Amino acid sequence: MVEWHMKSERKNSGGRRRTGRRSTKKLVWKGGTFSETKLSEKEQRVVLNKRGKTLKNQLRYALYANIFDPATKKTSKAKILTIIENDANRQFARRNVITKGAIIEVDSNGKKHAKVSSRPGQNGIISAVIVETVETKKEKRKATKKSKTKKTPFSEKGVTKTSEEKEEKPEEKKQAKEEIKEEEKKEEKQKEKDAEKTGENPKEEQGKKSEKEEEKLTKKEENVKQESKAKSEEK
């Protein structure tokens, strides 16, 4: 399959292009045959004759790659296990086609992911650089999404609440209520013990307090009535 890089003889409207003749002689504009470098058990290269008596090595079937580790700054030859991603075409990953920019899985002191930096159809070799695994990237994206907070619709003071604070579990609510009840019971028991030591009854004290409060209210009502009578007499 040849990639056609030249202009069409016709326009988008359907009319013939007048400037088409000048581009017929420039055969350099035409693309070459796509090598479709695939993963295989044996490597295979094809040598092609090009202009100026030059030769080009095309890698048709690949098994090994030259891997560069940026941590150790060393290159080593490693076996290619699978093709994980290829942004050029999603079908290439399924067909095990390797192009520049593809992410491959390599056996280099354990399974690692590497990004292809060479052009197998032009250079005849596969060079790649070790990168983070696709799984770790997905995990990082999920962590960043969880860390983001959501603003409440009625946030007057600009207070933000996370989704965890908004969604309180019913079990946690029950536990909080039980703890509050237990604390209240402990306080009541302690008050009863203190009253026994002093010889006072807490219930009687509460009755006395309520009587005093009623007397205060009655006094206030009487004062209000007297003030209203005095105002009416003045008028």
Image (cartoon, rainbow, N blue to C red):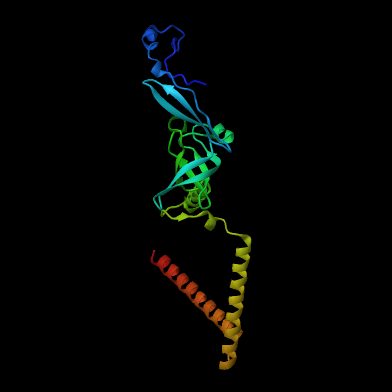
Q: Quadrant of residue 231?
A: bottom left
In the image, farthest residue toward the front: 53
Is 115 left or right of 189, judged from the image as shown? left
Q: Is residue 151 visible?
A: no
Please state which of residues 124 and 183 is positioned toward the viewer in this rendering.
Answer: 124
Is 10 left or right of 207, judged from the image as shown? left
**Residue 164 at x, y = what percent?**
54, 56
Q: Is residue 176 above or below residue 109?
A: below
Q: Is residue 106 above or below residue 33?
A: below
Q: In which quarter of the image is residue 189?
A: bottom right
Q: In this view, does 155 lie above or below 39?
A: below
**Residue 106 at x, y = what percent?**
52, 45
Q: Which residue is drawn at 43% across and 33% down?
A: 123
**Residue 56 at x, y = what percent?**
43, 27
Please state which of residues 25 and 90 is positioned toward the viewer in this rendering.
Answer: 25
Q: Can residue 110 be seen in this view?
A: yes
Q: Is residue 215 above or below residue 174?
A: below
Q: In which quarter of the image is residue 6?
A: top left
Q: Residue at x 43, y 36 (%)?
A: 118
Q: Residue at x 58, y 76 (%)?
A: 183
Tell me the quadrant of the picture where the C terminus can be found.
bottom left
Please state which of residues 81 and 163 is positioned toward the viewer in this rendering.
Answer: 81
**Residue 126 at x, y = what percent?**
46, 38
